[in-house]
Amino acid sequence: MLKAKLSKGPLRIAGTMSGTSMDGVDVAVLETDGERIYGFGETDYRAYSEAEQRVISRAMGQWSGPDVDRAAVTVQVAHQQVLKSFEGLDLIGFHGQTLSHDPRGGRTLQVGDGQGLAQELKVPVAWDFRSADVQMGGEGAPLAPFFHFACAKWIKADAPVAFLNLGGVGNLTWVDPRKSAPEDAGALLAFDTGPANAPIDDLMRERLGKGFDEDGALAMKGAVETGALELFLAEAYFSRMPPKSLDRNDFAEMIDLVRELSDADAAATLTGMAAAAVAHGIEHCPSLPATLLVTGGGRKNPVMMEMLRVSLDCDVQPVEAVGLDGDMLEAQAFAFLAARVARGLPTSGPSTTGVKALVGGGVLSSPA
């Protein structure tokens, strides 16, 4: 009954994202039928307080227990608060907060109760987007590529382009917009490139009590330690063929590689590692993209962006250069995926998560 109600025409959907940086909840409205973008709506952001960040951080890497329960409540309340200001919604795409991700072990955990959210807000909710993919042998990430395909169509790209999200972890989507649909053979390739902002943020908190390296100011004063960079690139992850994905803490030992360096050199080296991981990842793409469009917090770091431009033989631009919103692209992606869940369309496939066949992930919950 609910799917039938949501089965016709473009929908007004609020997508949400609470990412690995644990800074807060992004909400963005998208008008879509799950195949094409009809328009972009209003956005909002609800920051986590320092106390809330501590609650979520303590639960990172855990699968159950009191810390996980407390994090789940914190995430749920924050989403309810920010979503209450949105009116006229047909559907909500609720990602929740990833605490643990172990696709090789066949499990992933995003806390947040979509059924409870639907009942609280009186709006249908699509959620639990990753579990089905992981249960079928996929990586469960990244999940934005099908939306990136729609974005490439929206900007009228006529040659392969790539979208690079530099959040806590970096992930790359190569798109051939000449294909008709994201599930077509050769339309997409997606994978996590490696750690991005997470190690830099951890360094800043540990050494300086700051949340991140604003404008790359600290990295700009330092130099990359090549020995540490070489050790980093020798990690087995980089020799694995995509699709592949990472948990936020899979490269936690990166901090140890820069332990003896000055604050500035450590920041520069971790930034260089993130950029080098992307350059390594681009080599896996079927062809060099005409443009690399960068989204996520990393695009605001001029040191990171310059390192990418120096190391890549393609144009590197923030997604704003083509009229997209780099702060809200992931939230918009889960609005897009919510429409696909409601309409029974695939949300991931072999070329995006390595799953054996196309998967229509997600759970659809009614407020009734």
Image (cartoon, grey):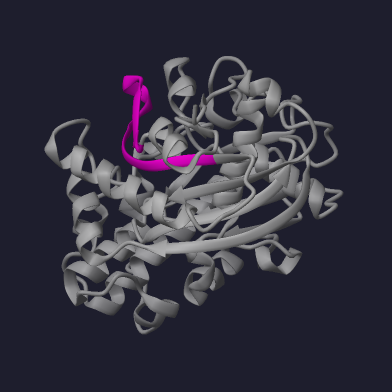
Q: Residue at x 37, y 34 (%)?
A: 113
Q: Quadrant of residue 223?
A: bottom left
Give the answer, above or below, for where 294 lies relative to 109: below
Q: Position of residue 38 (x, y in %)?
A: 79, 48
Q: Main secondary structure of the magenta part?
A: strand
**Within the magenta stretch, is there residue 96?**
yes
Q: Position of residue 287 (x, y in %)?
A: 72, 43
Q: Residue at x 27, y 49 (%)?
A: 74
Q: Is residue 283 visible?
A: no
Q: Position of residue 180 (x, y in %)?
A: 84, 32
- Residue ranking furthest to the left: 66
Q: Is residue 6 visible?
A: yes
Q: Quadrant of residue 115?
A: top left
Left or right of residue 157, residue 364 in this image: left
- Observer-nearest residue: 74 or 89? 89
Left or right of residue 131, residue 351 in this image: right
Q: Which residues are magenta?
A: 93-112
Left or right of residue 350, residue 302 in this image: left
